[in-house]
């Protein structure tokens, strides 16, 4: 039986974050995430009140074919937490078709598959494993409090070995001057490898312009449910 992956959504857009920001991209968002951040902007992949009635299971062959029809510069696998799935077959097919394939992961689980680019966004609820940290091409730290950056530097000083570390304001804090100033102060203090990050695609609402993208749901699902 051929492998099929549980897919929450797949759509054609452009990469809104990181070093590859602005490049045309076909996004594949897998279903399932054990990390479950309270400010998750993709809570439909795990939150019980937002899970669709049916989750589509699609073979890697079909996913690659759908992506190639759009002629993207890159294919990005995200989630949820994509690393809970074996993505070896998907990466192998992309390499055969000469389609660069990237992954965006928390780094808390072993990465199965050979990716051209690994974006690791560590989370305090389930910290990254060393094996995944060593594969990271860039880190993306979500700054949701004034102490977020210091907490990561003190608890995981090895992150400074990464060539590029993006500091992203958590989306609901994007207009909080305390958060923004903390990012600015860190960059001024350390310089490289720190950079200021942002979710540029949200300003353009570009993902929602593709019919394959699901509607936005509340950050983290619904705060009234205890998040």
Image (cartoon, rainbow, N blue to C red):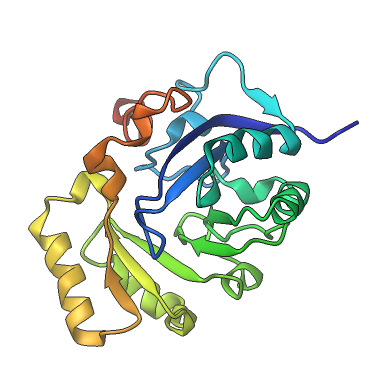
Q: Between residues 169 and 196, which one lies in front from this camera angle?
A: 196
The outermost residue toward the top is: 53
What's the residue at 45%, 58% (across, down)? 123
What's the residue at 30%, 44% (across, down)? 201
Q: Between residues 51 and 152, which one lies in front from this camera angle?
A: 51
What's the residue at 37%, 35% (across, down)? 207
Q: Quadrant of the N terminus?
A: top right
Q: Is residue 223 left or right of residue 15?
A: left
Q: Give the quadrant of residue 116.
A: bottom right
Q: Residue 178 location, x and y as percent? A: 11, 62
Q: Is residue 116 left or right of residue 187?
A: right
Q: Residue 102 location, x and y as percent? A: 56, 56
Q: Give the quadrant of residue 117.
A: bottom right
The answer to whether residue 146 is above or below residue 64 is below
Q: Give the quadrant of residue 164.
A: bottom left
Q: Quadrant of the C terminus?
A: top left
Q: Residue 204 location, x and y as percent? A: 24, 39
């Amino acid at each position: 039986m051929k492998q099929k992956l549980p897919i929450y959504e797949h759509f054609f857009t452009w990469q809104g974050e990181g070093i590859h920001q602005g490049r045309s991209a076909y996004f594949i968002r897998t279903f399932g995430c054990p990390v479950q951040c309270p400010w998750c902007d993709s809570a439909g992949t795990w939150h019980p009140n937002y899970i669709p009635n049916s989750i589509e299971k699609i073979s890697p062959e079909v996913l690659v074919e759908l992506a190639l029809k759009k002629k993207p510069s890159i294919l990005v696998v995200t989630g949820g937490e994509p690393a809970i799935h074996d993505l070896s077959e998907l990466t192998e097919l992309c390499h055969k078709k000469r389609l660069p394939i990237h992954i965006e992961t928390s780094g808390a689980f072993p990465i199965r598959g050979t990716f051209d680019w690994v974006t690791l966004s560590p989370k305090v609820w389930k910290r990254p494993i060393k094996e995944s940290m060593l594969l990271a091409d860039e880190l993306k730290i979500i700054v949701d409090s004034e102490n977020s950056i210091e907490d990561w530097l003190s608890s995981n000083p090895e992150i400074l070995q990464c060539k590029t570390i993006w500091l992203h304001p958590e989306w609901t804090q994007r207009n909080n001057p305390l958060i923004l100033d903390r990012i600015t102060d860190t960059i001024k203090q350390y310089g490289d490898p720190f950079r200021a990050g942002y979710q540029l695609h949200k300003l353009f609402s570009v993902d929602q312009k593709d019919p394959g993208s699901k509607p936005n749901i509340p950050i983290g699902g619904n705060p009234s449910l205890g998040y």
